Image (cartoon, rainbow, N blue to C red):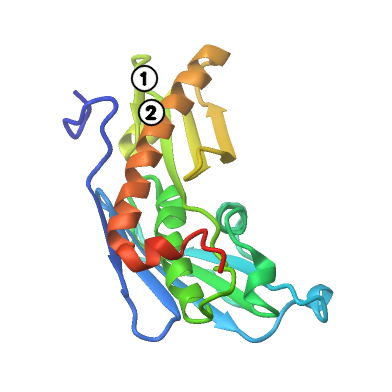
Amino acid sequence: MRTDRRRADEMREVILQRGAQKFPAGSALIEVGNTKIICAATIEDRVPHFLKGTGTGWLTAEYSMLPGAAAERISRERANTKSNGRTMEIQRLIGRALRAVTDLSAIGERTITIDCDVIQADGGTRTASITGAFIALVEACETIYTVGDVFPVKDFVAAISAGISNDGEKILDLCYEEDSAALADCNVVMTGAGELVEVQITAEKKSFTRAQLDELLDLARRGIDELISIQKDALGRELVWRVGRIG
């Protein structure tokens, strides 16, 4: 048993709630164990200069941790200062993950901005952000979709961590305590079709083998299948039916 008494292949409890905020085009609150994140999608009728006149839109993401999200206060990143390296890495990951399942030509010359704000952190904030932000993205795209056109979201996408514990066991969905002590930590982003969007894996204390990597990917796939099932329950039948819809 793990520190929180889960089985090695067991995820933390996931709660995914649509419509967490009133004003964004789409929003969600995701809770993965003690990690809690608000995800919002805003649509603007403009695109970066390199896309003007192309008929193609853009999707970008921003990520932040609120001051009270961790045991020690986190300093705010001011708008007039550069984000730290970790923040930049995570928000780029979120953007890449969502663009992988978005038909940017179907949103027209608009920009969708995804905001992920961590209100409580206990490991897995980047993976939970992707999983929750997908709900906000689908909700937002519904507001600009015209029946008979291509729905901008082509497939589901979710993310989860897997790792090798200090005693060599393969474990799914690491909390902070497990992440900080793991021999290897792997973040996996995958579509509903089972295609990989991104794999981030690092040996922390000891190198790992190709066979161990394959085991971690198989473990992550099972977790992502479960997350996508939770996403479908949160969206409801009508929006699930929209995803991948052409015409």
Whether residue 29 is visible here, answered yes or no, is: no
The quadrant holding residue 232 is bottom left
Q: Position of residue 245 (x, y in %)?
A: 51, 63
Reading the image, the residue beneath label 2 is: 181
What is the secondary structure assignment of the residue under circle 1? Answer: loop
Q: Tell which of 98 and 212 is nearer to you.
A: 98
Compared to residue 71, the image places residue 27 above or below, namely below
From where the camera sits, is residue 145 visible?
Answer: yes
* x 44%, y 56%: residue: 129
Residue ranking furthest to the left: 5
* Residue named by callout 1: 166
Query: Would residue 212 appear left or right of 105 to someone viewing this image?
Result: left
Q: Assess whether mark 1 and mark 2 are in contact (beta carbons under 8 angstroms).
A: yes
Disc 2 on helix, strand or loop? helix
Counting from the top left corner in percent of width and height, residue 36 is at: 31, 59
First of labels 2, 1 by sequence position: 1
Res. 126 mark? none
Q: Can you tell which quarter of the image residue 178 is in?
A: top left
The spot of residue 22 in percent (x, y) is 34, 84
The amino acid sitting under disc 2 is Ala
Q: Quadrant of residue 8?
A: top left
Pick the residue in front: 44 or 78.
44
Observer-nearest of 231 and 115: 231
How would you rate the neighbour count of disc 2 (Cα within 10 Å): few for under 14, some for 14-19, many for 20 or more?
Answer: some
Which image quadrant: the C terminus? bottom right
Residue 78 at what x, y percent from top left?
56, 74
Q: Residue at x 29, y 61 (%)?
A: 234
